[in-house]
Image: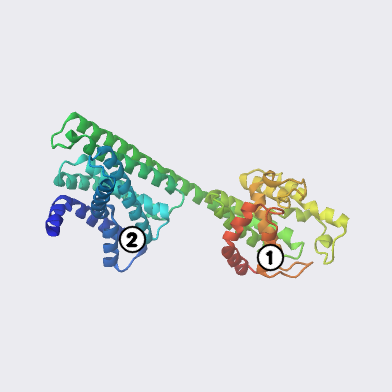
Amino acid sequence: MWIEMIIRRFAYYWPLLIAAFYFACMNTWIMHKLYNKERLIRLFISFFLVSSAFLYIPGEYLSEITYNKAMTLLSYNDINSAVYVAWKIFSDFLIVIAGTILYSKITKLEFHISVTSYLQYACIERLCFVLAISPITYLVIFAINQFIAFKINRKDLEFMSRTRIINWKKLSIYLYGLLFILDAFYCAYYIFPNLGTDEINFPTLWIDILTLIITGFMIGIIKLSFSEGRLGASKLEYMRKFADSQEHIIQTLAELSEAKSGETGQHVKRVSEYCKHIALQMGVSEETTEFFKIASMMHDVGKLMIPKDIIEKPDGLTPDEYEIVKAHTLYGEELLSKSDGQIIEMAKVIACQHHERWDGTGYPRGLKEDQIDFFAQITSVADVYDALSNKRAYKPAWKPEEALNEILKNKGTQFSPAVVDAFSAVYDKIEEVRIRYQD
């Protein structure tokens, strides 16, 4: 009985095994080409077993068993096609989701990148289900579609695996939507049996045309996303080159302000790196983060206008001297207002507001909560942590854990709660920077 069932299923599903074989070959080749992966046989077997084509076979069998048992338990003898279709689409989704998770574990790519790659194969397989009228036609259509997909994506393979500029999450959601539509079209054959004939009729042709149109739109969206991603990558590379050309000048100016207080340019470097890690953790784009990283170096540029004997004073400041020091925020704003550009504009706001406090008791203007510029909120945490964890003219360096606890203690009073949470999340990276750029 079991052997007979296996033979019967193999006679029907053998094209899926070829599709799984192709999936395994392509992904093994890509992983070896891009990452020089070894143990290719193990990798091939893993890809074969997690392919949506292979998983569909046991998935459909389990789906039928669970559906029949559920109907038996409910004493529901009349098989309702709509209920069966809903269950079939749902179970297929579960199988594909399981496949995407396993696939991401094997490839070790960023999750939504691996999901997008996996779903492209799954959608092509479901497209073939809709268009094919026999196992042979399935295989022919599959070969044609995979050839077209390879030609379209061939130049994007390395770009797909390495870039973070593309909104992979959005693409994966689109592809899940396409998968749902293709499953729904395929399952229409269960609701309307006349569609399941080998003859080409108007309803069948109508579904095939709609399927091709929707799939074509999705291919267009994917290609447009890749084009926008490449444009964004080029823009980011240009911006980085521009930023590098400006960074030395800006860092030199920032170091001059720090030198007045007996500090080194390492403080400037550390704060900018801290700011970068916090900003990325909070979802700021790479492009904006590069600007912010440079702009944050200018946070204390106003110290150039403060007398050196006050900044370097080892004892406590008098109230009048403290007011003079506080004025460096307004001096920084004034100095940077003389120039234009995105980096300078960002630096101007940071220089003015990085001593404002979340509870409104900071200076120079007593801003509170989100009245304070977002990037100034980040710089405030980065600047204070570095000031605490390194030696100053007026104090010895605190232990890193003491400085961290001080930041956490002032969450919601001195500092933005969201920024402190992000700081805590990347604290290991913060410490790596502090150690790397010690005075």
Q: Amino acid at mark 2?
A: Met
Residue sitting nearer the eye, 63 or 205: 63
Q: Say which residue label 2 marks.
A: 31
Classify mark 2: residues with Cα within 10 Å, few (<14), some (14-19) or many (20+): some
Q: Amino acid at mark 1?
A: Ala
Numbered badge on residue 403: 1
| Quadrant the N terminus occupies | bottom left
Secondary structure of residue under mark 1? helix
| Quadrant the C terminus occupies | bottom right
Secondary structure of residue under mark 2? helix
State how far apart marks 2 and 1 are (Cα): 43 Å
Tell me residue 4's x, y (percent).
11, 56
The residue at the far top in this view is: 202
Q: Is residue 60 visible?
A: yes
Residue 267 higher or lower than 151, as above or below:
below
Q: In front: mark 2 or mark 1?
A: 1
Color style of the picture: rainbow
Classify mark 1: residues with Cα within 10 Å, few (<14), some (14-19) or many (20+): some
Tell me residue 113's x, y (percent).
40, 52
| Residue visible at 29% across and 49% down in the picture | 121
Where is residue 411, by image quadrant? Answer: bottom right
Tell me residue 160's x, y (percent).
39, 52
Residue sitting nearer the eye, 336 or 189: 189
Residue 202 higher or lower than 162, as above or below:
above
Residue 39 higher or lower than 158, as above or below:
below
